[in-house]
Image (cartoon, rainbow, N blue to C red):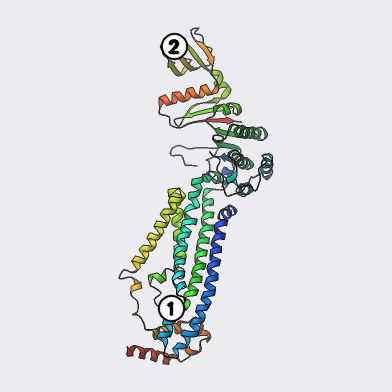
Amino acid sequence: MLTPSAGAIEVLGRPPADDPAQLGRVGFVAQDTPAYSSFSVEDHLRLGARLNPSWDAAVAKRRIEGLSLDRRQRAGKLSGGQRAQLALTMAIAKRPELLVLDEPVASLDALARREFLQGLMEVVAEDGITIVLSSHLVADLERVCDYLVVLAGSRVQIAGPIETLLASHRRLSGPRHDPRTLPASQEVITVRHTDRQSTLVVRTDGPICDPAWTVEHLDLEDLVLAYMTRAQGDAHAVRRTIAAVAS
Amino acid sequence: MIALAWRQFRLQAVVAFGILALVATVVLVTGSHLAALYDANVVPCANSHDCPTATAAFLRSDHFFQAALPPVLLVAPALIGLFWGAPLVAREFETGTFRLVWTQGVSRRRWLLTRLALVGTASMAVTGLLSLLVGWWFSPIDRLNLNRMSPSVFGVRGITPIGYAAFAFALGVTLGVLVRRTVPAMALTIVGFLGARGLHLLGATLPGDPAQDREPPLDARQRVAHALQNRPGRELGALQPDDQPQGTRDRSARRDRSER
């Protein structure tokens, strides 16, 4: 949407929004899934068909029927979940190679969220396209995504396959301890001390040998929170976004 | 892209052309009445010697429409800037739909150009037709009223309103892009347009302006003589009283001046 103030961005090997052909390769569902409120569902599909050379009317039709949306209904009268589904349908029917979703489920209730993500998973299974999705709801990401990127303070805090990340992080708790005494192979992410006890989140590929520690695995939410806490300590992170990739 | 631009503009276009049809009906009905009055009262007076009375009576006729029609051409460009110009881009920003439409397979440049072309052309077409109608309605009166450069007349005749419409539309779009919110953009557009319009009126009445370097007012008889000279139907021989030889009329005009 915006030209970078420094550096360059490449999407699928070319600058984004470079020309119509490049725009057609990337599907995008914006936050709050905007739609023209005076346009009917049908109008939106016609709009997509006219503006995208690779539009697949059959896919759009099947999805709209599958969602039992009334084609003559105005988008302004759809519920949040239905509008999100409409936006997703438009993004999918243009047959993109990459689908970018910016907090698509943030404003949806739990049921609509689940249905939306289910729709996403079907698309991934059928077409094998790559989806990049940002969300604050870590539990949703854990269910649908394979790859995690944590962004905080406009920097990538960590990126990697979710399984690898979960396997390589531990929570250590034990008697109060100076984190600098840990072996070099253990990268300390966060430290919390009480009078007698220390709790650390560390990243390590090897086993934890010190018997003084009680070692626990982290779940994804703890892991994300640990990195965000660290980022907040580093800089005053204002905007926190977690992006995750499903493919 | 044209289909989308048209779909977004459809309702506004229907409203505009509905209003245009309404104005056209009123203008055509009352305008033909005015033209008939002109033919019946003013044209024959060139032969009689009662022109001041006849023209004064004629210029007083249909007073309501004389007062009501020019403001139509003042207001139309302002409304166009307000309702077509300002929201064109600002509403997309406000509702977030720019994120939807800018990520379809059409470049932003083409998106903007298509919409500007469609709505901009419609703005000028509607105003042009209005100007044509109002100009036709006023044509008998303008023939008697020589001062077409007067600011209050110049701004509402011929192609001038089209220029004002294009200006108001461009102003509205620009402010919409800058402000990004519909209602503030509309408010700024109306202020900007009326400000510019007011400056034009003010500037045109300052000394040294061409509008001021005009002939001294003529008396009623001369006005009629002039009007008949300029009457478009004259070449077709439609106008019997005017068919006197050129020299006679010139002499009579000179005599008029020397009498004064």
* Disc number lying in front (1 or 2): 1
Rendered view: B63 above or below A52 = below
Pointers 1 and 2 within a single chain: no
Q: Secondary structure at mark 1?
A: helix
Residue B138 percent across, percent down from the top left = 47, 75
Q: Nearer the viewer, residue B122 or A124?
A: B122
Residue A62 percent across, percent down from the top left = 69, 41
Q: Quadrant of residue B144?
A: bottom left
Q: Chain of mark 1?
A: B
- Please tell me which residue is depicted at 49% across the width and 56% down the height of the picture: B83
Query: For the residue marked with disc 1, what is the amino acid?
Result: Arg
The residue that disc 1 covers is: B60
Real-space CA distance between mark 1 and mark 2, rounded to the nearest whole angstrom: 100 Å
Query: For the residue marked with disc 2, what is the amino acid?
Result: Gln
Q: Chain of mark 2?
A: A
Q: Is residue B169 visible?
A: no
Q: Quadrant of residue B161?
A: bottom left
Per the rendering, the mark at residue A197 is 2
Residue B96 percent across, percent down from the top left = 51, 44
Q: Nearer the viewer, residue A129 or A32?
A: A32
Dividing the image into 4 quarters, which one contains the C terminus of chain B? bottom left
- Please tell me which residue is depicted at 53% across the width and 77% down the height of the picture: B32
Q: Secondary structure at mark 2?
A: strand
